[in-house]
Amino acid sequence: MALHKDIYREFEDVVGPEYICDDPAIMPSYHGTEFAAVILPENTAQVQAIIKLCNKHRIPFRPVCTGWTGKFAPGFLYIDLRRMNRIIEINEKNMYAVVEPYVITAQLQAELMKRGLHLNVKGAGSNCSAMLRGHGHLDQTTSGDDRNHLAIEWVTPAGDIVRSGSLGSSDEWFCGDGPGPSLRSILTSAVPPGVTPGVFTKAAMKVYHWPGPAQFPVTGVSPNYQLSEIPPNMMARYYSFPSVEKMWQAEIKIGEAEIAFELMGFNIAMVAANISTSNEQEEENFKRLSKEIQGPGFFIILAGNSAADFAYKQRVLNQIVNDNSGKSVTSLEDPRTEGILLCQCIRISASIRETFRPGGMFKSIPVMGQRDLTIRWAIGAGKAKEPLIEKGLIVDDGGAAFGWGVEQGHLGKTEIFCKYDPHNEVANQAVEDWHKEQSDRAFRENYFALLIGQAVEDWHKEQSDRAFKERYFALLIGQNAEIGRALSNYDKWWNEIQKSFDPNRVSPEGGALV
Amino acid sequence: MGLEQYQGDMNMCCRCSACKWVPMQRVSGYQFANVCPSISRFNFHSYSGGGRMNIGAAMLRNEISYTDRLQHIVYNCQMCGACGVSCNYAMDMNVMEPIYELRIKCVKDGKTLPALDQTIEGLRKTGSIFPPNGKRGDWAQGLDLKDAAKDKVAVMLYVGDVTSYDPYLQKLARATAKILQKAGVDFGIAGNAEVSSGDRAYQLGYEEDFLNQARKNMDYINRNGIKTVVTADAESYQAFKVLYDKYKLRGSLQVLHITEYIRQLIQEGKLKPKNNVDMNVTYHDPCHLGRLGEPWVHWEGKKVPGDRFVFDPPKQYRRGSNGVYDAPRDVLNSIPGVKLTEMQRIKEYAWCCGSGGGVGRSNPEFAQWTAQERIDEAETTGAEAIVTACPWCQKLFNKTIDDGNSRMKVFDIVELFEQSIE
């Protein structure tokens, strides 16, 4: 799988010997995959040169940022974007920030907060790229997915540099759609494969008004961080409701009233995870909090732009909660806990504690669509988890799903996952089966579940087949075809577009910005 | 048991990259968000804490063998522990212990670096990790100090290798002794009988050499009825307090860093800083006093079968929460005229000075690169001096400043405190 030494030298000439490596010793840390090499470009010109060489030698590549868990194909050139880590511009007037791929969200967010701004923090966490596409806790007010990408600098799979949107005509980053080429649906596709071929080298991210402090007053020593005071114009609460219907009605009303800074449909297990500093503590807190709730619920953060605005939002929230028989979990109103939740949910976007800590792995099915419908689907998926919980194969979270409204509830996201020990073969298989059954059910029932990843996994099962490219593409095309039939055969168009951008098929998996 | 006992921990790594950064709540801007010198300098993920977990796990599965690159990864790490703190904000897993074990395995397998072998050879011959220069106790000439072996003292001042032999740093030993004299403490020193605490040997993976030193020290202490050891050498402090305890050699010996002891003596009214020391300073937390100075937690148990990574009895992870952070700051703040301005990365998420893990010997360029990053950070505070509480930090900062163009001065806390009580 290693590169021929002459080819290796060509890549080395681009980045210098310090920034390319094919030594087997580094591969365990690159997803345990036998990559042809790992290369670390410093700028767009180097990315372009690397991709041109990939085309010249027909070497498939995969660009990656922080590189959270993933499955990767051996033999690829792994483009680690770690050295491309600059904030190019924060444009306060036009409310966008231009970043390279390895600026993490926590860095950009901290800089933005100093300027009274913030951005959508994706569910993957603030330890991931600031230009990541996806959803997160702040979707209620910042939207999610591709909506926050403005102009993008993109090196295509063929090695051309394309500047999308306004950047294509004016050297300005303020718009993703023009004046200039609008490639939004190609660059940030929301349908499978959901990944962009080639490499994003810079992107402008939309930023939003931040009503909170320039810096949270964090005190204490890790992992027991707290806020010395709750900002006077902010409040975090968890409300539970007697039924899903009541919870959903409250969500709608809150969206209509546009009062929430963040509305996160956490289940109580996720709250327990976020306020706990160990697995044992999490179990205890989950048991305790489960007794304090009356049914499904959500976590909400209010942030006032003035004292009057804050008071108004509080009054409206109380009215909506009361109208729907909601009840606050009072133990979470303790300022110490409230501060933890504010920080966890705004600065960190929770994530690691609630996903990987208990067992080391989780497997998820995210479903996009109207919340009341997708919640119904998720209830079924949750019931299907119960036997696994009873057998002790997955972590007990009450079988609950989670989710939130996007754009004040115009759209929604619902997600459900199993947390488990991936080294337990029985658990692994049980989760695998659950995942497939429930994903298929979502698809059959016309929910938009993100199935991408299955093709990669199928490919991995066949990795002994050295004619991997042909098989891999067939699987990808087959995967997309299944969804395509339900969506105007878009997959055929997509395949044609991809061929034109990637004539040598060197970028089959697209990028991974997580 | 070696590396094997941490297989479960290493398998827990989810590759989130938290180990590369200060804990997310503490990221206060674009600058100074990194926490790991190794990944910051060498960039490939293998150089991060998580990458080292992945390598350790792969070694146990016999999936990789030794290469030059592997040794480069293993030994280009200051063993500063910052990765573990950032990981353990969210995750329940041992991070530093498997990294130590990986080095121990390398030594057992004979996969070491010549520069480090040479250092250990020196230790075996001289009892010091730092090349001797004269007699070990020469620094004490004229101070009229008690001999801990002859004079039956309850408190022993342990000086450490670098402070004993480095002509420039010997002033720290003298200042420390003078502070204790001023407070009327009944203390003694081992003088020429003092030997290395073994901390560096442990950091380099030479476990047996470390244990030899530890046994020698504890024999001396037990033989002479010493109840308390005070030291201004942060690495030795960590050895006596944490490592000796880990290997069940410490017994009931009380171990105090000089800053802890000074604070106690101030509280007891035995020391009263009076003289103005007008200086704007910033404080650098030595890794071995701070996050690595956290007490050892003895635990024996087994994983509870099932879905969660939990243990019976529950495992207490050393997350950096209980390191020594306040005592040095309290001492600094007690000195009239000293104005302390903090850097961005402090306490449990402080950036390492660059000296640890043998990097100063095996890759001095990397050590100084790391120190320069800290000096740059210190300069952003507007302070005129970095104050630290470890001679190794001071030595490397001075060297880096001498080789560069910073005007920053470097002091140990004992130097400033002594001025305030003279």
Image (cartoon, coloured by chain):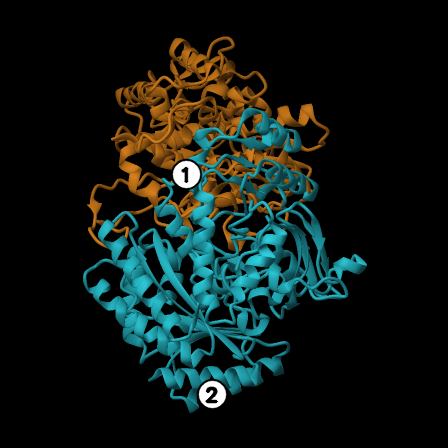
Instruction: Kindly state the secondary structure of the residue where label 1 is placed.
Output: loop
Q: Nearer the viewer, residue A206 or B159?
A: A206
Q: Residue at x 33, y 43 (%)?
A: B11
Chain under label 2?
A
Q: What is the drawing colour of chain B?
A: orange
Name the element at disc 2: helix
Dividing the picture into quadrants, the one containing residue A399 is: bottom left
Q: Nearer the viewer, residue B161 or B355?
A: B355
Residue A89, horizontal then vertical, whole percent: 72, 55
Extreme residue in the bottom direction: A323
Is A281 on the left-hand or right-hand side of A410?
left
Query: Would residue B194 be seen by someone viewing this image from the given angle?
Result: yes
Which sits earlier in the primary sequence, circle 2 or circle 1? Answer: 2
Residue displayed at 47% across by 9% down: B135
Instruction: Name the residue that disc number 2 marks.
Output: A320
Q: Which mark is residue A411?
A: none
* Chain given the colour cyan: A
| Residue A346 sits above or below residue B411 on the image | below
Per the rendering, the mark at residue A466 is 1
